[in-house]
Amino acid sequence: MRSRFIQAANRELSRLAFREYVASSEGLALYRILYATVILLMGLPRALWIPHYGSAFFRPPFGFTWFLEQGVPPAWFFVLLNGAATLSAIMLLAGYRTRVASLAMFVSLLSLNAWRYSFGKIDHDLVIIVVPLILAFSGWGTDYRWIPWVAAEPASTLIRPGFFCWLWLRP
Amino acid sequence: MRIYKRVVASSFFILAALLVCQTLIQIRYGEPYPAIWAPGFAASATDREGKVTMETAQIIVHFSPSESRTLSPGALMFDVTSAHARELINCFAIFAAQPFLLDRPVPLSMLERMAASSFRAPRSDEATRRRLRGWLKSRLNILLPGRIVQSVDFHWIQLRFDSTLPNMAPSVTTQRIDEISFHSGS
C-alpha cells in the first residue's frame, strides 16, 4: 500500500517536474532575448556609486563581503564587473556562447549586488539574477541566434528543467 | 536522462538544506545575501497595534546663525535611489546623543529577531566618524559650491502610519526624536 502511494507520488512529481511545464526552444530563446534586453536597458550599469561612499558607510550582511576587512574596492573594480555583465548580456542577446554568457552574467550581477547591498539595504532582485543560472543549461541559446555560423550547444546535452522554467518564468 | 532526473530531484533537497542554513544564519547574524528566500519588508511591518513605523531624517545645513538650508536624505545622497539613501543616512546616527538607531530593538524573541533581521548597526569607531565627517564635508562642497558651512544638524523623524484607520483619516504622526549637531569645521 505504502509503495503504491510512493510510486504514485513519484509519478506525479516526475510529471510536474519534467513534463507539465516544458518550454519550447523558440519560447526560451524569445525569453533570452527579452531578458538580455531588459538587463541592458534597465539593469546596467549598477553599483557605480559605491566608491563615492567608501568604507564609512560599509555595513555588510552575512555573505561574500562579510569577511572583507580591506573596505570598498576602487572604482575600476566596479567598472570591470559592469563591463563583464554588459558583455554577457550582449552575448546572450546575440545567442553567442550562451552557457558561458549565462554563468558569467549570474556571477557578475551577483557580485555587483553583494557590494550594493553592503550598505544597509537589500532588494528583491535576486529572482531576476538567478534566471541565467537556472536557464544556462536549458537550451535557451539554440534558436534566434544572430551568429548562426557559430555552433549552438549540442542538442543531446540540453537540459530542459520544465518545472524550474515555470518556477522562474511565471509572473 | 536518469542522471539528469536525479540532479533535478536532488536540487530540491539541496535547496531545502540551504533554507535551513539560511534560517540559522538569519537568527545569528541577520539577513544574509545572497539568500534562498527574498528579504522581508521589515521597514513596512506593522506592530501589535497595527502601526507602521518608518524613520527618516532632515539635514539642516547652517551657513550662519540666521541662514540655513534643509536637505532630504535623497538630496544629500543624490547618486543613489531614495531607498538606499534612507539606509545610508542612518550611518550618521553614530553622532546622535541618543544612539537609537545603533542598537537592535530589545527584547526580541526568535521570531521577532527574524522579522527584524534586516537591521544592521552602523560602525561607530573613531576612524568611521572621521571618514563620515570628511565625506559630509566634501559632499556639501559638491552640493553647495562656494558656500562656507558652519554646522549641520540632523533631525531624526519617526513616521507612524496607522494601518487600521481609513485612508481619509489622518494616519501619519511626526515625532522629532533627537537633534544632533555636526560641525564640519571641527
Image: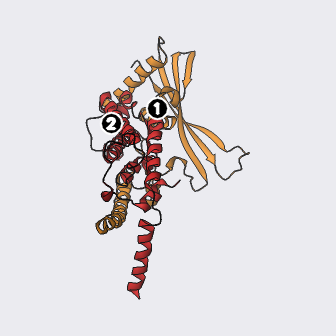
Chain colours: A red, B orange
* Element under disc 1: loop
Quadrant of the rendered image containing residue A146: top left
The spot of residue B22 in percent (x, y) is: 36, 57
Q: Residues within 10 Å of mark 2 (few under 14, many from 20)?
A: some
Residue at x 42% of width, y 59% of height:
A164
Residue contact between numbered discs 1 and 2, judged by CB atoms under 8 Å: no
Nearer to us in this view, B55 or A162: A162
The residue to which callout 2 is attached is: A84
Q: Amino acid at mark 2?
A: Ala
The CA span between labels 1 and 2 is 22 Å
Quadrant of the rendered image containing residue A68: top left
Q: Residue furthest right?
A: B168
Nearer to us in this view, B36 or A4: A4
Report the chain holding disc 1.
B
Disc sitting over residue B80 in the figure: 1
* Element under disc 2: helix
Residue at x 29% of width, y 34% of height:
A71
Residue at x 30% of width, y 69% of height:
B2
Answer yes or no: are tags 1 and 2 on the same subunit: no
The spot of residue B183 in percent (x, y) is: 43, 21
Nearer to us in this view, A92 or A107: A92
Report the chain holding disc 2.
A
Q: Amino acid at mark 1?
A: Val
Confirm whether residue B174 shows in the render: yes
Quadrant of the rendered image containing residue B173: top right
